[in-house]
Image (spheres, rainbow, N blue to C red):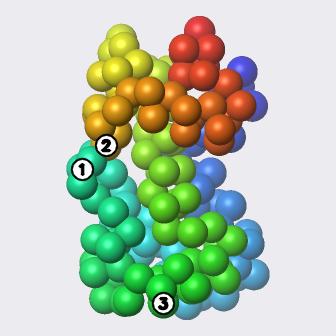
Amino acid sequence: REKAIAKFSIEAVRNQTESTSKNNVAENEFINKVIDIIENNYTNPQYSVENLAFDMSMHRSQLFRKLKAVSGKSAIEMINEIRLKHACELLRNSSLNISEIAYETGYNDPKYFSRIFKSIYGITPSEYKN
Protein backbone atom coordinates (compact mmCIF):
# COMPACT_ATOMS: atom_id res chain seq x y z
CA ARG A 1 0.00 0.00 0.00
CA GLU A 2 2.84 2.42 0.81
CA LYS A 3 4.39 1.77 -2.61
CA ALA A 4 1.05 2.53 -4.27
CA ILE A 5 0.68 5.74 -2.27
CA ALA A 6 4.17 6.89 -3.30
CA LYS A 7 3.48 5.95 -6.91
CA PHE A 8 0.26 7.98 -6.95
CA SER A 9 1.65 11.14 -5.34
CA ILE A 10 1.72 14.51 -7.13
CA GLU A 11 5.48 14.82 -6.76
CA ALA A 12 5.88 11.51 -8.59
CA VAL A 13 4.61 13.25 -11.74
CA ARG A 14 7.28 15.95 -11.50
CA ASN A 15 10.06 13.51 -10.64
CA GLN A 16 9.12 11.11 -13.43
CA THR A 17 9.13 13.82 -16.08
CA GLU A 18 12.31 15.41 -14.74
CA SER A 19 14.23 12.15 -14.88
CA THR A 20 12.95 11.52 -18.41
CA SER A 21 14.19 14.90 -19.62
CA LYS A 22 17.90 14.27 -18.97
CA ASN A 23 18.23 17.30 -16.71
CA ASN A 24 17.71 19.75 -19.55
CA VAL A 25 16.80 23.00 -17.80
CA ALA A 26 14.50 24.31 -20.54
CA GLU A 27 12.61 21.03 -20.69
CA ASN A 28 12.24 20.95 -16.90
CA GLU A 29 10.94 24.51 -16.90
CA PHE A 30 8.46 23.61 -19.66
CA ILE A 31 7.18 20.55 -17.79
CA ASN A 32 6.96 22.43 -14.51
CA LYS A 33 4.96 25.20 -16.20
CA VAL A 34 2.58 22.63 -17.72
CA ILE A 35 2.14 20.91 -14.35
CA ASP A 36 1.60 24.22 -12.54
CA ILE A 37 -1.05 25.31 -15.05
CA ILE A 38 -2.85 21.97 -14.80
CA GLU A 39 -2.60 22.08 -10.99
CA ASN A 40 -4.34 25.46 -11.02
CA ASN A 41 -7.15 24.21 -13.28
CA TYR A 42 -7.65 20.50 -12.59
CA THR A 43 -10.92 21.03 -10.70
CA ASN A 44 -12.51 22.69 -13.73
CA PRO A 45 -14.40 20.03 -15.72
CA GLN A 46 -14.32 22.30 -18.78
CA TYR A 47 -10.51 22.54 -18.74
CA SER A 48 -9.22 20.88 -21.89
CA VAL A 49 -6.15 20.47 -24.05
CA GLU A 50 -7.20 23.59 -25.96
CA ASN A 51 -7.23 25.58 -22.72
CA LEU A 52 -3.82 24.24 -21.75
CA ALA A 53 -2.41 25.13 -25.16
CA PHE A 54 -3.85 28.65 -24.84
CA ASP A 55 -2.39 29.03 -21.33
CA MET A 56 0.99 27.87 -22.65
CA SER A 57 0.73 30.28 -25.61
CA MET A 58 1.16 27.40 -28.04
CA HIS A 59 -0.86 25.77 -30.76
CA ARG A 60 -2.48 22.50 -29.70
CA SER A 61 -0.41 20.39 -32.09
CA GLN A 62 2.81 22.13 -31.05
CA LEU A 63 1.98 21.45 -27.39
CA PHE A 64 1.28 17.80 -28.20
CA ARG A 65 4.60 17.34 -30.02
CA LYS A 66 6.67 19.06 -27.34
CA LEU A 67 4.98 17.29 -24.42
CA LYS A 68 5.31 13.92 -26.16
CA ALA A 69 9.00 14.54 -26.85
CA VAL A 70 9.81 15.77 -23.34
CA SER A 71 7.58 13.60 -21.16
CA GLY A 72 6.40 10.79 -23.41
CA LYS A 73 2.79 11.74 -22.60
CA SER A 74 0.09 13.64 -24.42
CA ALA A 75 -1.59 16.71 -22.91
CA ILE A 76 -4.77 14.82 -22.02
CA GLU A 77 -2.68 12.12 -20.36
CA MET A 78 -0.97 14.80 -18.26
CA ILE A 79 -4.31 16.39 -17.31
CA ASN A 80 -5.81 13.02 -16.38
CA GLU A 81 -2.71 11.96 -14.47
CA ILE A 82 -2.71 15.10 -12.33
CA ARG A 83 -6.46 14.87 -11.73
CA LEU A 84 -6.06 11.23 -10.71
CA LYS A 85 -3.13 12.02 -8.40
CA HIS A 86 -5.37 14.48 -6.57
CA ALA A 87 -8.16 11.91 -6.56
CA CYS A 88 -5.80 9.42 -4.90
CA GLU A 89 -5.01 11.96 -2.18
CA LEU A 90 -8.72 12.53 -1.60
CA LEU A 91 -9.41 8.79 -1.55
CA ARG A 92 -6.76 8.36 1.14
CA ASN A 93 -7.41 11.44 3.22
CA SER A 94 -11.08 12.32 3.01
CA SER A 95 -14.45 10.85 3.79
CA LEU A 96 -15.90 11.89 0.42
CA ASN A 97 -17.52 9.17 -1.66
CA ILE A 98 -16.27 8.23 -5.14
CA SER A 99 -18.79 10.45 -6.96
CA GLU A 100 -17.88 13.48 -4.88
CA ILE A 101 -14.19 12.87 -5.50
CA ALA A 102 -14.85 12.59 -9.23
CA TYR A 103 -16.60 15.97 -9.22
CA GLU A 104 -13.90 17.54 -7.00
CA THR A 105 -11.18 16.52 -9.44
CA GLY A 106 -12.82 17.83 -12.59
CA TYR A 107 -14.73 14.82 -13.88
CA ASN A 108 -18.41 15.31 -14.75
CA ASP A 109 -19.16 11.59 -14.84
CA PRO A 110 -18.22 9.30 -11.92
CA LYS A 111 -18.40 6.24 -14.20
CA TYR A 112 -15.89 7.80 -16.60
CA PHE A 113 -13.71 8.72 -13.62
CA SER A 114 -13.76 5.13 -12.37
CA ARG A 115 -13.01 3.77 -15.85
CA ILE A 116 -10.02 6.12 -16.32
CA PHE A 117 -8.78 5.40 -12.79
CA LYS A 118 -8.89 1.65 -13.37
CA SER A 119 -7.21 1.91 -16.79
CA ILE A 120 -4.32 3.90 -15.29
CA TYR A 121 -3.86 2.16 -11.93
CA GLY A 122 -5.31 -1.29 -12.53
CA ILE A 123 -7.69 -1.06 -9.56
CA THR A 124 -10.99 0.71 -9.01
CA PRO A 125 -11.22 3.81 -6.82
CA SER A 126 -13.21 1.76 -4.29
CA GLU A 127 -10.45 -0.85 -4.09
CA TYR A 128 -7.85 1.89 -3.70
CA LYS A 129 -9.83 3.56 -0.90
CA ASN A 130 -10.00 0.31 1.06
Q: Nearer the viewer, residue 14 or 118?
A: 118
Residue found at x 74% / y 72%: 20
Circle 2 crowding by C-alpha within 10 Å: few under 14, some 14–19, many from 20: many
Say if mark 1 contacts mark 2, CB within 8 Å: yes
Q: Amino acid at mark 2?
A: Gly
Up/down of 8 relative to 53, above or below: above
Secondary element at image label 1:
loop
Give the CA separation, mark 1 to mark 2: 5 Å
Disc with the residue nearer the chain's start (3 vs 1): 1
**Where does label 2 land, which residue?**
106
Residue 44 disc label: 1
What type is the residue that disc 3 sits on?
A: Gln
* 57 versus 101 height, above or below: below
Specify the quadrant of the image occupied by residue 4. top right
Q: Is residue 126 left or right of residue 100?
A: right
Label whose residue precedes the other's in the sequence (3 or 2): 3
Distance Cα–Cα, label 3 vs label 1:
23 Å
Q: Is residue 32 left or right of residue 103?
A: right
Q: Could you tell me if residue 38 is visible in this image?
A: yes
Q: Closer to the camera, 124 or 111?
A: 111
Q: Which residue is mark 3?
A: 62
Q: Residue at x 62, y 51 (%)?
A: 12
Label 2, secondary structure: give it. loop
Mark 1: which amino acid?
Answer: Asn
Image quarter of the C terminus? top right
Q: Look at the numbered discs 3 and 2 and tell me whether their residues touch, using CB distance below 8 Å.
A: no
Residue 46 image-quadrant placement: bottom left
